[in-house]
Amino acid sequence: MRNVSDRCRGPLFGVAVILPFLLLFLWPAHAEENDQPGACCLLPGVCIDSQTESECDDIDGIWQGPLSGCGNNNCLPGACCLEDRLCEQLTAGECALDGGEFQGSSTDCEACIEPEVACCFPNGGCLNLIAEDCANAGGSALFEGSVCGVDECDQVGACCLPDGTCEEDVSPEACEQMQGVYQGGGSLCAEVKCEVIVSACCFATEFCLLLSQVECAKVNAMWLGPGVMCDDQANPCATPDDEEPSPDLNGDGVVDVFDLLLLLEQWGSCPSSTEGEGEPACPADLNQDGTVDVFDLLLLLESWGTVESSD
């Protein structure tokens, strides 16, 4: 006969033993979420300090985040500038929790709207745009408060040169020729901060490094100018593979019967003219239409006997 105590040592007994330990480890982790006190807004203008999130919820308040305080938060909503130029009416604490920039109590969302300026384009056209959109569109923004039709686009301004120095009364075209960064029409060197410009520097091996113009010149490499970055996906130093395929298929300097035989060997469709890196998939696809056919044959015959340049 089994002892009564033995029957108690079944699954329920195991749960009874383990449960206290689970609660011991899980409860503090859960409690820590609301453990740090912060400000709690009850009504607009009414704030209570040192409340945990759960305590604030219990009194139907709006918790302002851990370690927030009523000293810099009067619980009055204001404009909160968020990413992607969005704006919401939030309290300072709510705005901080959402990663926004609070514009102050009782402010409206106009505070988040970046003012437009006259944006001048190389063809002489002008649009009123915010500075970021102007730069992305390839234009040059004039000074703050400028308006198309009122302020001229041919104004000169400050130009930040690659070495970090600044020149005034420079047109956008002249600044570009000096490989500088134009600071906008009417701008002055005293108003802008010029820094040494680093950009893509190309070595003979097609290796790319971000260097200043002076550093790049020291190693006899090619500096690509302001705004050009080294990119693993599209190396700006790589030799563009945009040369027309040569009818001299065997590379002996003469287009002859041997090249004709190579073309006939590749007759028909091919995967593509080029397959990523390496040699072309179909060197005989001279018109690069994906098929080696009579049109490629005619192109080869047009160059018959031509000695290809070694350049």
Image: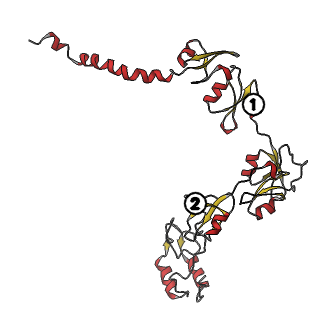
Q: Which mark is residue 109?
A: 1
- Give the amino acid at mark 2: Ala
**Is 251 rendered above or below residue 59?**
below
Residue 278 x %, y %: 49, 69
Q: Quadrant of residue 196?
A: bottom right
Spatial CA distance of label 1 from label 2 is 40 Å
Q: In which quadrant will I find the C terminus?
A: bottom right
**Is 251 rendered above or below residue 237?**
below
Q: Secondary structure at mark 1?
A: helix
Q: Earlier in the sequence, mark 1 or mark 2?
A: 1
Which residue is found at the position 78% from the left and 49% from the top?
A: 192
Residue at image mark 2: 234
Q: Secondary structure at mark 2?
A: loop
Residue 130 x %, y %: 77, 44
Instruction: Give the residue furthest to the left.
Output: 1
| 10 Å crowding of disc 1: few (<14), some (14-19), many (20+) | some
**Is 279 rendered above or below residue 111?**
below
Instruction: Give the residue furthest to the right.
Output: 150
Closer to the camera in the image, 99 or 11: 99
